[in-house]
Amino acid sequence: MSNREKALSYAQENKEKFLDELKEVLRIPSVSTDSARKDDMLRVAEWLVEKLEVLGMENVEIFPTAKHPVVYADWLHAKDAPTVLIYGHYDVQPEDPLDLWETPPFEPTQRGDSLHARGASDMKGQVVATLKAVEAIVKNGELPCNIKFMIEGEEEIGSPNLLDFMEMHKELLAADFCLNPDAGMLGKELPSITYALRGLAYFEIHVTGPSHDLHSGLFGGAVRNPANTLMTLIAGMKDENGHITLPGFYDKVRAIDAEERAELAKLPVNEEFLLKQTGSPSLWGEKGYTPVEQIGARPTLDVNGMLSGFTGEGAKTVLPAKAMAKISMRLVPDQTPDEVYEQLVQYMEENAPDGVKWDIKVEHGGNPSISELGGVGVKAMSDAMSTVWGTPPLFKREGGSIPVVGDMQKALGIESVLTGFGLPDDRIHSPNEKQDLPTWYRGIDALIHFFYNLA
Ligand code: BES
Ligand code: ZN
């Protein structure tokens, strides 16, 4: 039996053990945005260190950053073989609303083929899959390539400290390319490699008017209502064709050519698929583009939350003193968060009426990216997927954001192989997040093949 075959059968024999370890780490509520969970963040980092050391990784280290630490490790003894930088994030999104979870978010629970827990799919499941693939290999021989791990704790808050970290540790992180398993696949039988991600710019807009909430009868009609004003301003940011009206917003948007449009049209993501995934009564988006293009290749501007006035039971006749909206834009190459911020400010300056004051607070952001598909990493992953699924991967654009991908091109000059074993119906960022376990096990096998294909 070859070492590759031994590793594959080790993975087969250790399915239960692998799953137990995934459950262990899912029990730790590492919500990066929640300052009350700082200790839990550290606990996961330490959990990773222990696992990496057991695998015989070297230079295992927790690097503190301004917020949550980065875990690093390497093994660099494969002569004449490429070096892969394996990226992961150990933080997760908040679990709220808690009452919509069928079982508690940090008590991983199996129902049928699914393992339910926050982070099961995004992306502790993917991180553990890479660790277990490496384990299967090192328990049955030597790694066929050189590997470095960089696992951060700030992805879900926009990776604010990772670009600096990479720039400070260029040599330590030097690699031929990056494996980034944070981008999921299109279906159980549809392994996928992602070549484009959208960026993100996230803001809070505050509008204030009267110095205090007013009686809406005694004063209503004679002063501006901040809630109405904010709604009018937001409504004006998009026209009836779904075009965003901020000045200059599309100037840097890279057009998709006819050839790429034809390729995207072949993907099995049709109207029926999206209606099913979203539960929306119908689809709606920018005119002139298909839904796949709207999600993968066009920017958006969306309200993520709003707050103003009375929202309790019954009625209260009040004219609110202030209103707030959380607004985010998904960006495509070559837009940048800084530029769209300027455009938003200009729009507000030109359109906000007298009688209110406004202020914009910048939350996080991240650059969009396009990855090259020609490298040895994509070939090794593509072959691995063909072996495991019996069908070659689909090449897709993703609407979500992973800031590190563009940052890595900039700081380290390397491309990423973007993939993953999460599915579109995993409800990432939502209650009842799950990981499909048969797909997870296939993912581990694919990763074992991937490392061997690089030899
Ligand atoms: N893994 C996701 C992004 C993703 C999901 C990409 C599915 C491709 C397919 C990632 O963890 C994520 O959610 N990112 C955030 C980034 C943001 C907070 C800067 C996002 O997209 O909202
Ligand atoms: Zn996420």
Image (spheres, rainbow, N blue to C red):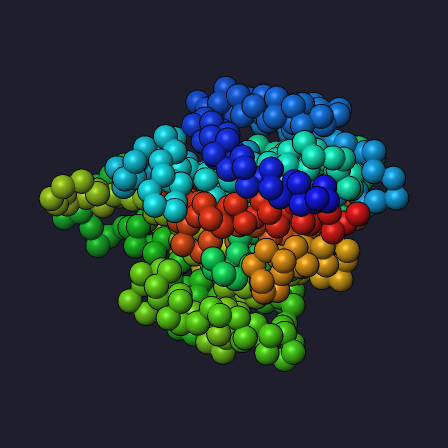
User: Is residue 423 shown above or below 83?
Assistant: below
Q: Measuring 34% from the left and 63% from the top, which residue is drawn there?
A: 276
* Left or right relative to 367: residue 167: right
Q: Nearer the viewer, residue 386 or 295?
A: 386
Q: Position of residue 159 (x, y in %)?
A: 60, 39
Q: Nearer the viewer, residue 438 or 374?
A: 438
How many tags in the picture?
Answer: 0
Q: Position of residue 28 (x, y in %)?
A: 45, 26
Q: Residue furthest left?
A: 314
Q: Position of residue 347 (x, y in %)?
A: 50, 59
Q: Residue furthest front?
A: 1
User: Is residue 42 shown above or below 202?
Assistant: above
Residue 321, picture quadrant = top left
Residue 302, picture quadrant = bottom left
Q: Quadrant of the N terminus?
A: top right
Q: Position of residue 116 (x, y in %)?
A: 38, 40
Q: Measuring 75% from the left and 25% from the top, which residue is drawn there?
A: 58
Q: Nearer the viewer, residue 149 or 301?
A: 149
* Left or right relative to 443: residue 37: left
Please indicate, yes or no, whether residue 141 appears anywhere in the rendered image. Answer: yes
Q: Residue furthest right?
A: 80
